[in-house]
Image (cartoon, rainbow, N blue to C red):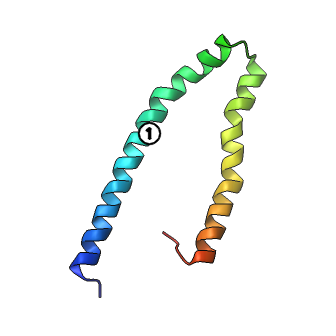
Amino acid sequence: MHSPADRAGAASFALRVRIFYFFHFVAVGIYYPFLVPHLRGIGLGGSEIGTAQMAGSVAAVPGALLWGAIADRLGAPA
């Protein structure tokens, strides 16, 4: 059984994660619409801008696999 202190700690952690993700998505929502005009302003062409925006998505695939492998190795699925 989990003690009330364990449940309170888990609830506190969940709240902190929710707050972090809220502010993360606010920051992305503010940053992302201005990225393409900025890149055009510094003289990049369409294919270069597409490559710059694609880089994060391409890096996310092996990053997620690596993150999962590390979590499995450490026995910490959360």
- Kindly indicate the quadrant of the structure image that contains residue 27: top left
Picture residue at 44% right of the left edge, 39% below the top:
25
In the rendered image, the residue lying farthest to the bottom is: 1
Residue type indicated by callout 1: Phe
| Quadrant, the N terminus | bottom left
- Relative placement, left or right, of 35 versus 49 is left
| Image: 46 above or below 63 | above
Q: Position of residue 11 (x, y in %)?
A: 28, 65
Picture residue at 69% right of the left edge, 52% below the top:
61
- Relative placement, left or right, of 41 versus 26 is right
Q: Nearer the viewer, residue 42 or 45?
A: 42
- Relative placement, left or right, of 74 versus 14 is right
Q: What residue is shown with label 1?
A: 25
Q: Position of residue 72 (x, y in %)?
A: 61, 74
Picture residue at 78% right of the left edge, 23% below the top:
47
Q: Position of residue 59 (x, y in %)?
A: 70, 47
- Badge 1 marks a residue whose secondary structure is helix
| Image: 70 above or below 62 | below
Picture residue at 65% right of the left edge, 11% below the top:
41
- Within 10 Å of the Cα at label 1, are there few (<14), some (14-19), or many (20+) other Cα atoms? few
- Kindly indicate the quadrant of the structure image that contains residue 39: top right
User: What number of labels is visible?
Assistant: 1
